[in-house]
Image (cartoon, rainbow, N blue to C red):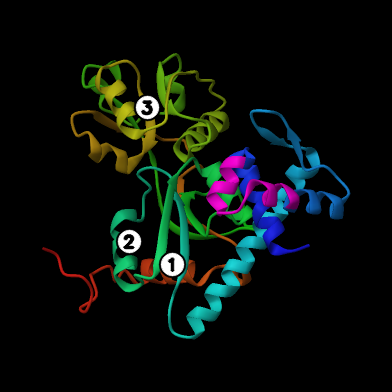
Amino acid sequence: MELRHLQHFVAVAEDQHFTRAAERLLVSQSGLSASIRALERELRAPLFVRTTRRVTLTEAGRALLVEAERILAQVRSAHEAVAAVQGVLRGTLSLGTEQCIAGVHVARLLAAFRGRHPDVEIRLRQAGSGALADEVAAGRLDLAFAYRTRADTDQLRSVSLTGEPMTVLCHPGHRLAAAAAVVSPDDLTGEVFVDFHPDWGPRRTTDAAFAAAGVRRTVALEVNDVHSLLDLVDENLGIAVVPRHFRHKRPSLTALPLKGTGETEYETVALLPPERATSPAARALVTLLETGDLAPPQDGPQAT
């Protein structure tokens, strides 16, 4: 089995199309097809279901994809490790993050990183914490800033960033605002809730808090970005339970502490693969985050 066969296989799996994958890889479509056939012969299993419009993975293909991505990530890390020993950090830093993550200013951190390591290509994507954890464990991301969704495993480890309590946000004209008191999940029974997709860290934290309190709630208004959530609460269409730092994004809203959440504090972490599989670029980024030295380097690009 050759690395190029795995690279070709992953490209077709990602694009779900032979022609598009061939164009991206800068190879002929016939050559790409021959590469996939060679891989299928070696594994003695079909990897794709082919139609005139698209290709989809078979069960064997799905199993191979997980391992192929991990192998290619390790090969990339090996190349980058050798370059780092030679004194130059090169390659790609693939980073994931939830929106408005606490404990790290992502844009500022990446700007500082680029100033120190201009030969590293930075790739960034936003997603929910569950998806980000899976991406790091599979080797598709070098690291991610997310809510702690699971205990450390042999494929995933975490570095704590910060923790904070959850807060109830409501319109100033809402009945809760008039009370201006600490509230519990019981006090929110029957309320209309605005919340994020179930994969998001704040949603997971809130669901856990209400489950621990034995209180059922229904999320009537589900969004995938912070500003939409704040807009809906600002129009008095519902209330939201969010990490405390969200209150600073919309000072016009009333923020009330939520009690009785116990161990469901919102904790954000940097998710990384095992130490042996962590890329030099990811190590450099974590070091920069831990030292807090985010000022531009003296010999780096100057602002204009």
User: Looking at the rendered structure, which numbered label has been put on residue 286?
Assistant: 1
Quadrant of the rendering where the C terminus is positioned: bottom left
Relative horizontal placement of residue 140, taking residue 124 as reference (left or right): right
Pointer 3 residue? 240
Predominant SS along the magenta part: helix
96 or 226: which is nearer to us? 96
Locate residue 285, reporting x and y percent: 41, 67
Q: What is the three-letter code of the residue carrying label 2?
A: Leu
Extreme left residue here?
304
Secondary structure of the residue carrying numbered label 2: helix
Residue 7 among magenta residues: no
The question of residue 30 being in magenta is answered with yes
Q: What stretch is highlighted in magenta?
A: 19-34
The residue labelled by disc 2 is 109
Residue 99 picture quarter: top left
Question: Which image quadrant for residue 76?
Answer: bottom right
Task: Decide if residue 294 is in sight here.
Answer: yes
Classify mark 1: residues with Cα within 10 Å, few (<14), some (14-19) or many (20+).
some
In the rendering, at what x and y percent does residue 69 appear? 65, 55
Q: Give the Cα distance between marks 1 and 3.
A: 32 Å
Q: Which of disc 2 and disc 3 is earlier in sequence?
A: 2
User: What amino acid type should be assigned to the residue bearing mark 3?
Assistant: Ala
SS for tag 3? strand
Circles 3, 2 touching at the beta carbon (< 8 Å): no
Q: Which amino acid does label 1 sit on?
A: Val
